[in-house]
Image (cartoon, rainbow, N blue to C red):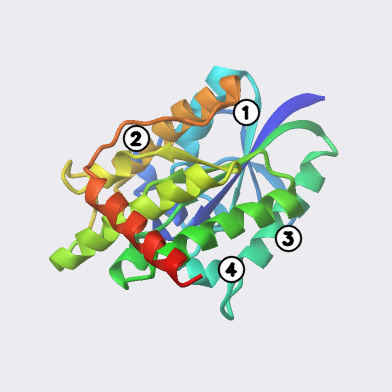
Amino acid sequence: MDKIDVFLLIGQSNARGLGNPKDSVIPNENCFEYLSSNEIVNMRCELETSEGDGTIAPAFSNEWNRLTGNKVCFIHNAKDGSRIKNWNYDNNWFLNDTIEKFNAGCNTLSKNYKITNKYVIWIQGESDAKYGSDVLYYKESLKKIAYRLKEECIIDKMFVSLTGYWLGEDEYFVRTRRIAAAQEFACNECDILSIGSKIAMKFHDQGLTIDDVHYSQEGLNMLGEDLCKNIYKYHITEKKIILKDTIDLSEARKYICELEKINKKFM
């Protein structure tokens, strides 16, 4: 049987992908996607839930295939505008549907391929930053998502692309840094989680967005390749990825440390 690595791509709109597929990398013949109809299809420049828009998947998959020699299959279940509470707690429970789809996909794939790795890519955080989600709540919720995916899907690792930010009030940028720091803290505290990329935090400054929050296809291509490069480092070393900051998160880290000290006093 041919070897195949499976990637679950989840999060909010930048995980869904709002790029122009005409500017996408063209996926090669070793790249596939699992559909909710229980079909495995050759990967296109858009994925099932991207509604015809471009994603990170082709750029990621071509490079992963080149580096590993393994075939690649993406399972896509990103949700526009979702906050982390929509995945784990409130009436949406997006994670339940995601787990069901991922396991169905892996079951179908295993009939014709040897699944060698099951990884998750999480691209999310802008909505939580904009609307001021509590950072400690965010951190613990992200860890709970990882624990459930490990327990119910037997994933090998979940990789977090640190959030980009939402243009607008200055407070949004402060909140964004805090959500990014919360993502970082979660990765440090949970062995299932690892930071996968930090480059999206600079996309606005680099002209790689199409509006106040969404990454352009050029940005998505770059993010796909960066995630691939960094996840491959874990793949060959099985050690957590250490990445340099792209923006200064020192104040946000201090803020979270102070909150945790306060919380401990009341426990």
Compared with residue 97, is residue 159 higher up or lower down, i.e. above or below? Answer: above
Count of numbered tags: 4
Compared with residue 151, is residue 202 higher up or lower down, i.e. above or below? Answer: above
User: Is 58 in front, or is 226?
Assistant: 226
* Residue with the mark numbered 2: 222
Q: Residue at x 40, y 31 (%)?
A: 226
Secondary structure beneath disc 3?
A: helix
Q: Of label 1 and label 3, which has the lower sequence position?
A: 1
Q: Nearer the viewer, mark 4 or mark 2?
A: 4
Gap in angstroms between the C-alphas marked 4 and 2 = 29 Å
Gap in angstroms between the C-alphas marked 1 and 3 = 25 Å
Q: Of label 2 and label 1, which has the lower sequence position?
A: 1
Q: Residue at x 67, y 38 (%)?
A: 156
2 and 1 marks in contact (CB < 8 Å): no
Amino acid type at mark 4: Asn
Q: Nearer the viewer, mark 1 or mark 3?
A: 3
* Residue with the mark numbered 1: 30
Q: Of label 3 and label 4, which has the lower sequence position?
A: 4
Q: Residue at x 49, y 45 (%)?
A: 187
Q: Of label 4 and label 1, which has the lower sequence position?
A: 1
Position of 127 compared to 57: left or right? left
Q: Which mark is residue 100?
A: 3
Amino acid type at mark 2: Met
Give how far across and how far down residue 208 sits, in percent. Answer: 23, 44
Give how far across and how far down residue 206 sits, in percent. Answer: 17, 41
4 and 1 marks in contact (CB < 8 Å): no
